[in-house]
Image: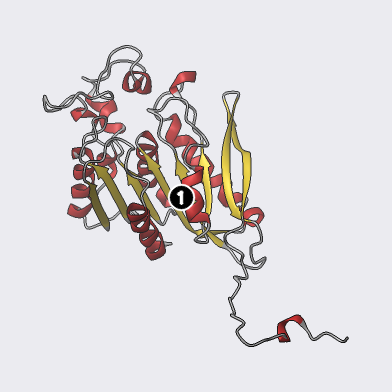
């Protein structure tokens, strides 16, 4: 029996499905890529890439920074959720920064984010990265790092857009809470995250608080990328007013920004939903 070419075979009632040349749902995980070594500390990326990309194609990149109160990060915690974005055709790199548990204070984390971007751009050929289409995204302290990186270093880095999940931006209001809430970030007490981040109680040091605030770096005529800001209205760690201040400052200075509130969402909870992720995907589709 002489068989036909497989693609020529057909019988009554047969249905046809169409494959994707990039086979996007087959995601490959590249663990523990060292992007820098600083002060004897190796800093790693966790990467999600398509297993069989088109060899001649370059892909947009999302750099994700997991929040941790600037302490040791759960380096793998967000990867399962970020797989959705890898399946949309994005390369995803989740980075670690030097942390306060090992004595690294502000601005070490921002310096590390810049190093991660520069490493990925330098190795763009290895990972098929489109260096003109890089986004940065973070949550909580990771969002603070992401936002600061985009505002301070973007002339060199060329980041195309920023996603900010409930990041702090104004350290002057950390203790300004209504009596109905008890916050776990605003305390300047010894051993508290904010104390470790600044290396002591800097609540009266206006200059260093200004240096650490993203609001300081927003003014007209700068190369500031579009922002997507999302915050829960029951966040008892970073008050939603931080995101309101950031959004208003961006809009007042004529920059593109979108702001969403998540009803009943606490700090980091109720965020990884299909509705919220679809908003993030639309944002990336528009700007990457």
Asked which colour scheme the image uses, the reply is secondary structure
Is 193 situated left or right of 259 in this image?
right
Looking at this view, name the residue that lies furthest to the left: 179
Q: On the image, numbered disc 1 is attached to which residue?
A: 156
The residue lying toward the viewer, choosing from 274 and 178, is 274
Residue 30: % across, % down: 63, 45
Q: Residue at x 51, y 43 (%)?
A: 79
Question: How packed is label 1: few (under 14 Cα within 10 Å), some, or many (20 or more)?
Answer: few
Q: Residue at x 51, y 58 (%)?
A: 90
Task: Tell me if residue 96 can be seen.
Answer: yes
Residue 196: % across, % down: 37, 19
Q: Is residue 18 above or below residue 137?
A: below
The residue lying toward the viewer, choosing from 125 and 237, is 237
Residue 181: % across, % down: 17, 27
- For the C terminus, the image quarter is bottom left
Q: Is residue 130 above or below residue 141?
A: below
Q: Secondary structure at mark 1?
A: helix
Q: Is residue 246 above or below residue 4?
A: above
The residue lying toward the viewer, choosing from 174 and 271, is 271
Looking at this view, name the residue that lies furthest to the front: 13
- For the N terminus, the image quarter is bottom right
Q: Residue at x 34, y 36 (%)?
A: 140
The total number of labels drawn is: 1
Q: Residue at x 28, y 13 (%)?
A: 189
Residue 138: % across, % down: 40, 42
């Amino acid at each position: 029996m002489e068989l036909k070419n497989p693609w020529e075979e057909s019988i009554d009632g047969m249905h046809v499905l169409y494959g994707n040349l990039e086979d996007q749902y087959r995601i490959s995980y590249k663990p523990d890529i060292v992007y820098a070594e600083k002060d004897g500390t190796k800093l790693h990326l966790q990467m999600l890439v398509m297993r069989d990309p088109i060899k001649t194609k370059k892909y947009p990149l999302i750099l994700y920074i997991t929040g941790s109160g600037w302490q040791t990060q759960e380096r793998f915690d967000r990867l399962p959720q970020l797989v959705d974005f890898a399946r949309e055709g994005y390369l995803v790199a989740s980075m670690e920064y030097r942390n306060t548990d090992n004595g690294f204070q502000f601005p070490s984390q921002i310096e590390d984010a810049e190093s991660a971007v520069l490493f990925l751009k330098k190795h763009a050929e290895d990972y098929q990265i489109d260096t003109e289409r890089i986004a940065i995204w973070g949550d909580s302290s990771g969002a603070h790092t992401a936002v600061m990186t985009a505002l301070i270093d973007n002339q060199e880095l060329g980041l195309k857009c920023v996603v900010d999940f409930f990041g702090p931006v104004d350290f002057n209001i950390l203790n300004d809470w209504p009596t109905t809430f008890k916050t776990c970030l605003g305390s300047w007490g010894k051993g508290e995250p904010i104390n470790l981040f600044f290396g002591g109680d800097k609540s009266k040091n206006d200059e260093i608080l200004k240096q650490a605030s993203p609001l300081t770096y927003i003014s007209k005529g700068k190369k500031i990328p579009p922002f997507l800001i999302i915050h829960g209205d029951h966040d008892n760690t970073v008050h939603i007013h931080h995101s309101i201040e950031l959004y208003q400052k961006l809009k007042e200075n004529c920059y593109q920004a979108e702001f969403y509130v998540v009803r009943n969402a606490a700090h980091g909870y109720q965020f990884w939903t299909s509705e919220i992720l679809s908003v993030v995907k639309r944002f990336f589709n528009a700007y990457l």
